[in-house]
Amino acid sequence: MKRWLVAVLICIVIVSAFVAYLITLPPPSKVVAPKIGIFYYLWYGAPDSDNWNASKFIDYPVLGNYSSSNATVIKQQLIWMKDAGIDFVVISWWGFYSPYEQFIDNATKQVFEVAEDNMTNLKFAIMVEPFNKTGNSYDYSGIYDHIYDEFVVPYSSIYYNYTTMPLICFFNDENLTDNGSIPLDRRFNTVLVGQSPYVQWVYTDLDYYVQPSRVPYTNEISVTPRFDDSRYRTPSCVVDPNLTQGTYDKEWENAIKLWKDGRIDTIMITSWNEYVERTEIEPHYDGTANNTDPYFLYDKTKDYINQIQQFAEQEHL
């Protein structure tokens, strides 16, 4: 009887010690889904723009040949983005001097207004493009002030913060970003975007074969369904124009692997509606693909984002 009691006491002590050990262990690390961003263009309908020039556009949106300043169009686009699981939108912004630039600037304000009025839960940031500067150099202070005063301050609840600071991107250009050394502003987290060796975020990188073994960018990778600027540039770059090579699937699979390996925290989609280079995933009628479903690329995007979210939730249980 005494031996039995001693055995019970020993078991209690062992169990108590094990419970105490478990309590002292750090909580399991939470699997955090990457932030999903997308590049968004607002030049459609602008003065001196192509305005859906049939010689340069072979794909056309479900919404018709819209103006980027149309509030109804913007609202539907933001609804689609939100439903797809996109977290933030990077708007291509082209300055504030010419009528073309002013159109895009005003359309950008319209996007922020529509988003704020409709509580989409999307966040927004600006990407400064190499617009037609005045004088010999860009007025970086003026650019920072304009973005801060016109977009960050009045729309602080929906402006996207990247690592706690409002994000501003600059697209790589020999004049705008030179060799990667540009003036910074302590109010922003400034990120250079493009293909140059000095950028922090890549815009398009369709070389998915080698990407898993090298990530030269800062915790970010892009996914692009195809690239085809053959109706706009000479020489041109053409990658998977008919969507038959599975480029988009390989890009997503690569990005998800990099995220699971803990090497990235941001996936940028290129793009929502860059129709000249044919990278758009916005619902559209495709000019060359065998699949005639206008939601083909949009639904594929939505499915991959959903896979990421489900994996993150399951790993956190």
Image (spheres, helix red, strand yellow):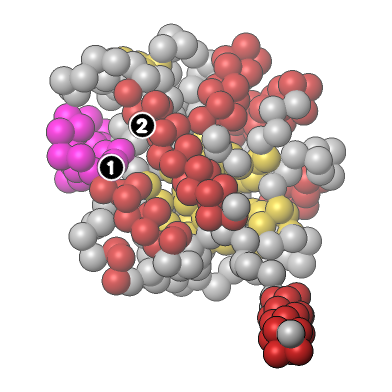
Which amino acid type is marked by label 1? Asp
Residue at 66% over, 57% down? 162
How far across and how far down the image is residue 259, in percent?
45, 60
User: Marks 2 and 1, Cα distance to the nearest angstrom?
Assistant: 8 Å
How far across and how far down the image is residue 89, in percent?
58, 39
The relative height of residue 37 versus residue 64 in the rendered view (above or below) is: below
Name the magenta segment's main secondary structure: loop
Q: Answer with left or right where residue 85 lies relative to residue 197.
A: right
Task: Identify the residue under disc 1.
Answer: 249
Task: Identify the residue under disc 2.
Answer: 300
In reply to whether residue 241 is colored magenta, the answer given is yes
Which amino acid type is marked by label 2? Lys
Q: In the rendered structure, which segment of residues is drawn in magenta?
A: 225-249
Residue at 68% over, 62% down? 163
Q: Residues within 10 Å of mark 1 (few under 14, many from 20)?
A: some
In reply to whether residue 220 is colored magenta, the answer given is no
Q: Earlier in the sequence, mark 2 or mark 1?
A: 1
How far across and how far down the image is residue 241, in percent?
19, 33
Q: Residues within 10 Å of mark 2 (few under 14, many from 20)?
A: some
Q: Nearer the viewer, residue 241 or 261?
A: 261
